[in-house]
Image (cartoon, rainbow, N blue to C red):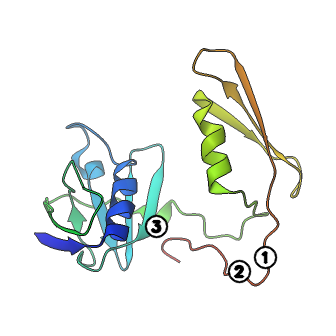
Amino acid sequence: MQIQITKDENERLRWMQKAAVKGNERPALQCVHISGNTMATADGFRVHAGKAPTGLLDETVAKLPDRILKRDEVIEVETPDHKSPTFSTLIPTANPAYEVRVEAKYLRDALEGFEGTVTLCFHKEWDPIELLGKAPDTTEAYVLLMPRRANPTEDSAWRPYQ
């Protein structure tokens, strides 16, 4: 199946590929799964979900090409006959105890200094967030990340399957 995608949809699909299984194991988890207007990928450790490009139909399982360029383009997607995992059952449905907002750039910058597992420590709703772990050279690494106050006029964050 061929679909036309925009540069923005293209970036979203490349991000989705990061959570898809690589290699030949678990072929159903190598695909993007579409349900309604939501697409999701998972590798057993994480789920990436987002709004599906308009060219992908509801209830589709699509294997994306290995390489997606950073531009508007037509891509060829395989539609293998795999049963789609039920990602919607993994997404919490209860309201969170509290939400903490951080700048994505600051969180990305902080995580680049770690290797392996990182511990996130939340103390109180508006206290700084601690990130603990090891740097790539195996020395201890520590980050203190300040939360952002939510703007009451901002829309609440989008959650898949809700």
Instruction: Say which amino acid is labelled 1.
Output: Asn
Residue 44 location (% of width, % of height): 42, 44
Residue that sits furthest to the front in the current view:
71
The x, y position of residue 62, in whole percent, is: 21, 62
Which secondary structure lies at badge 1? loop
Residue at point 76%, 30% (across, down): 142
Looking at the image, residue 41 sits to the left or right of residue 56; the answer is: right
Seen from the viewer's position, the closer of residues 22 and 86 is 22
Under circle 3, the secondary element is: helix
Where is 53 relative to 15, above or below?
Answer: below
**Measured along the vertical axis of the image, is residue 6 above or below residue 47?**
below
Q: CA distance from mark 2 to mark 1?
A: 5 Å
Hey, which quadrant is residue 36 in on the image?
bottom left
Q: Amino acid at mark 2?
A: Glu
Q: Could you tell me the amino acid type at mark 3? A: Ser
Location of mark 1 (residue): 151
Residue 70 horizontal/vertical position (percent):
30, 58
Q: Kindly identify the residue that appears in the image at 67 percent across and 77 percent down.
A: 156
Which label's residue is closer to the chain start, 1 or 3?
A: 3
32 relative to 67, above or below:
below
Q: Quadrant of the N terminus?
A: bottom left
Question: Can you tell which mark lies on residue 154?
Answer: 2
Query: Dot 2 lies on which element?
Result: loop
Q: Label 1 to label 3, Cα distance in Å?
A: 28 Å
- Front in this rendered view, residue 72 or 46: 72
Density class for disc 2 (Cα within 10 Å; few <14, some 14-19, many ≥20) is few
Viewer-nearest of labels 1 and 3? 1
Tell me, yes or no, whether the two marked residues, 2 and 1, touch with CB atoms within 8 Å. yes
Reading the chain from its start, which is encountered first: label 2 or label 3?
3
Tell me what residue is drawn at x 66 percent, y 39 percent.
110
| Residue assigned mark 3 | 88
